[in-house]
Image (cartoon, grey):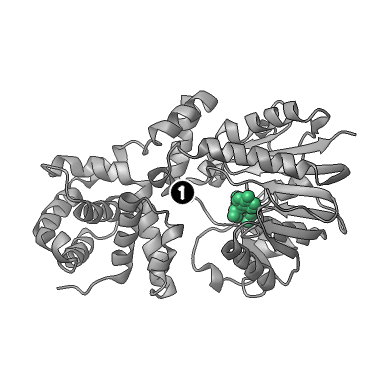
Amino acid sequence: MASIDPARRAAAALLSGVLQERLTLAEQAGELAALAPPERARAQRLALATLRNLSRADAMLKPHLRKAPPPDLHVLLRLGTVEICALQEAPHGVTDALVTLARSGGQKTEGFAGLINAVLRKIAADSERWARLDAPALPGWLRGRLMSAYGKVAVMRMEAAHLAGARTDLSVKADPETWAENLGAELLPTGSLRLAQTGQITELPGYETGDWWVQDAAAALPAKVLNAKPGERVLDLCAAPGGKTLQLLTAGATVTALDISAPRLDRLEENLTRCGMRAETVAADALDWTPEAPFDAILLDAPCSATGTIRRHPDLPFVKDASGIKELVALQAALLDRALGWLNPGGRLVYATCSLLPEEGEAQITAALARHPGLTITPISAPGLEPGWLTETGCLRLSPDLWPERGGLDGFFVAVLQQGH
Ligand SMILES: C[S@@+](CC[C@H](N)C(=O)[O-])C[C@H]1O[C@@H](n2cnc3c(N)ncnc32)[C@H](O)[C@@H]1O
């Protein structure tokens, strides 16, 4: 009998956490702590691929199952199906490994080793059907809202982008051309680097020396459009884990980085240390805190549904639903109202969310303009932006179906606001 594969066992545990306990993969990071880095990366890759392909795996399994399998067995069957059909791993090896895992799984799975063996053999024999299956659809609550906002064709393109996943992008401190060459990466028109392959990030040149940090090309745009100048006092509100703080510091600004979450601020501090940069950090609820002096510019990267990041976080549709969106929209408005009062005359505020929902983006800004007479939108311009990415009012609307030829972008909304006198 084959020995137990720790990466597969961890992947199955992560999948059970998402599908049965509705825990995000990030919330389950502790599950992976005992694994060596390559095994950890493999476990994550297996879990991500299975979540991205879940409805396709179920469509493959359906004809071979007489009734719905118990949840722990179902996870093993789905994982095996995705490994065979999507990742094109050798069916015999996958089947043996999952049979071994089932036998070691106690009462919940040990009795199903024979069934796993039989079903995965049928899946392997039937695997040419895989290519004809549709991309998995978003859950109904989200799909309906996105259809109203973007139309069916765009939503189907977004679903295809979610299935394709995301490459790893980096923001560099300086000299993007040289780093692109050193890392064999593509230099995107917006200035981010896109890696050809996602390997062990911490092993790449420039990681230890803090010359770059991981940041999606879309997530790099809010700080770029804020366009901080050397010596400006900038507040990064909702700052952790600090990708945008690093950008503002690189531009030469004096930055106060505030976040409500102390553990997330610890990660921000680690990132600052690695990159050799310094900011004032504040652990506080922005709704209670008041600055001692106003700022030249504020970046409000507000907490949101994160629906723009599903291609990177395919667990989100399984653990989140529409509940909580209203509260997030109210929190974003309260943060916006408060932050607008902390600007120097003529100061600018960049509002950003990694959401695809208009109520967390376009509608949030329309409502803010109605609440604050004299508040105006400054039309966005920055290198590399495509004209079609700008809304009629000059805000930036990004979605994962953009730049398909380059490998997509996270969904984001960005607005630059200025308070009149
Ligand atoms: C989208 S994330 C920020 C990402 C960050 N700007 C970056 O680029 O790495 C939103 C952040 O808002 C923080 N947050 C949520 N509610 C807050 C509040 N009331 N006051 C301050 N920060 C808050 C969360 O802890 C979370 O870190």
Mark 1 burial class by Cα count in 10 Å: few <14, some 14-19, many 20+: many
Residue 154 vertical position relative to residue 313 in the rendered view, above or below: above
336 or 127: nearer the viewer? 336
Residue shown at the point (63%, 70%) measured from the top left: 270
Classify residue 87 as left or right of residue 354: left
Disc 1 marks a residue whose amino acid type is Gly
Total labels: the figure holds 1
Where 336 sits versus 374, above or below?
A: below
The quadrant where residue 351 appears: top right
| In-front residue for pair 139/292 | 292
Q: Quadrant of the N terminus?
A: bottom left
Give residue 324's position: percent from left, percent from top. 49, 40
Location of residue 377 by image quarter: top right
Q: Is residue 234 visible?
A: yes
Relative depth, front residue between 133 and 415: 415
What residue do we see at 17% from left, 63% from top?
A: 102
Relative side of 33 to 257, left or right: left
Q: Residue furthest front?
A: 288
Q: Position of residue 248 (x, y in %)?
A: 76, 57
Of residues 210 and 131, the one drawn nearer to the viewer in this rendering:
210
Mark 1 lies on a secondary structure that is loop
Residue highlighted by disc 1: 165
User: Residue 286, percent across and down?
Assistant: 68, 51
Please state if 189 lies on the left or on the right of 146 as rendered: right
Is 169 left or right of 74, judged from the image as shown?
right
Q: Quadrant of the C terminus?
A: top right
Q: Where's residue 190, x and y in %?
A: 69, 48
